[in-house]
Amino acid sequence: MTGPSLPLIRCEQVRKRYGHRRILRDVSFSVAAGEVLALLGANGSGKTTLLRIVAGLDKPDRGEVWLGPVPLSNAGHEIRRYVGVVAHAPLLYDRLTGLENLRFYARLYDLDDAEARIEHLLRSLRLWGRRDDAVRTYSRGMSQRLAIARALLHDPPVVIFDEPDTGLDRQSLDDITELFTQLRSRGRAVFVTTHDAARAFSWAERVYELRKGCLQQIAGSKRNGE
Amino acid sequence: MMAELPKEGGQFRTRGGLAGYFRVVWAVADKDVRTELRAKEILGTMAAFSLLAAVIFGLAFDLRVPRTELVAPGILWVIIMFAGVLGLHRSFGSESDLGTLTGLLLAPVERSALYLGKTAANLVYFLIVEALLVPTLLILFDVNLLKPLILAGLLLGTIGYVAVGTLFAALTARNRARETLLPVLLLPVLAPLFISGVGLTAAVLDGRATSEAWPWIGIIALYDIVVFAVAFLFIDLIWEQS
């Protein structure tokens, strides 16, 4: 396993522009194993763009993203096995059941122990009783929990969350907070974006804000007592 | 068990090989067909359009054409072309609308396997629609299209159409105007296939020598090979910024 000294996510001098608009200006940060890093920012500040670049869905104009020792620019498709993404949309097929959705993604990830892994995730995320229902009958909170199950199905070392708290009730938010604690204790690197500063401080060791394309660390994270 | 990143300078272990590649193709096709059997969006639209178009062509030509064999080849291929466009834009369009296209692109699989899986599912839809259309034309026009060379040409032509159509559907998936953009891009590219399909069907229906039909089959087969080669070359590029 990658040692704790080597960050699982390392973003170096990343720049991105769309047309004449600079979205990201020399953004650099790293996330170690067992660490949660939260990113704050207004709508359109570039949070999702940065997240997509870290997830390998988009390419920076300049700079490099590393997952462990591997630069994304030189990595093949196998690198995607090491990243789980909970996007703003749940990335689920609404006509399929929860179980069918996870089985489909398990086939894409070619998992050896798919059925056991799916059952474990569905039970731990309180969806086992609704596993045979079509996803379109799920509430927002249930869809979000299934999206988390999809992202964690292949047990990736790097997990990325794009505003996972949007539209969730208190119970679901508590579930996410608990999930971050578990991921931290199991040595995963978690990168999460949110609009809610108080929540960011409660979730993360370090909190950054993306403003005018620049990344600024915000002092006073409650977790590490800065 | 957590997937482990390779150590510095290490290599990724590629899983599955060719069998793994085709497992992904099958998974995507299976998922698409399963979803479509519940939604009936693509099949329902294509089948309804095909049958209605056949009836309208039947009404239009019934009193004026002395031999329906003269118009049947054109009618067959025109209906397939337009019905196909109706279905193809949903192939990636529904994935784009649901956001699941991102889920597919996040998976550690070859993009070409996703493309082939989508192509296979589209081929199933097309063949089901054609299985309804050919007997309908037999009833309405009294033209027997159930001849081996016509069916072979239809199968090969459908494979080529679906291959190029799925590629263009991937290209236009994230475009808001994909419903109008797809036919504008696709129909000119389909011209060689359309001309060959009509030529082959007419040659067989006119009872000309088999040797006159084979060159058309050859052109369609060549078209298929070229389309798949182009698709495999460009599919990564199409999805690079998706």
Image (tube, grey):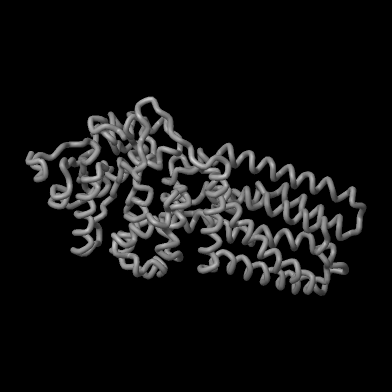
Residue B49 located left or right of residue B237: right
Q: Quadrant of residue A215?
A: top left
Residue B1 placed where, x, y %?
35, 45
Image quadrant where one finds the C terminus of chain A? top left
Image quadrant where one finds the N terminus of chain A? top left
Residue A81 placed where, x, y %?
40, 42
Q: Residue at x 44, y 47 (%)?
A: A109
Q: Residue at x 21, y 64 (%)?
A: A169
Residue B181 located left or right of residue A96: right
Residue extending furthest toward the top: B9
Residue B147 located left or right of residue A35: right
Of B32 and B6, nearer the camera is B6
Using the image, determine if residue A63 lies above or below residue B137: above
Using the image, determine if residue A80 lies above or below residue A147: above
Of A92 and B135, nearer the camera is A92
Residue A72 placed where, x, y %?
38, 33
Residue A49 placed where, x, y %?
32, 42
Q: Residue at x 45, y 61 (%)?
A: A100
Residue B88 located left or right of residue A148: right
Q: Quadrant of residue A50?
A: top left
* Figure label count: 0
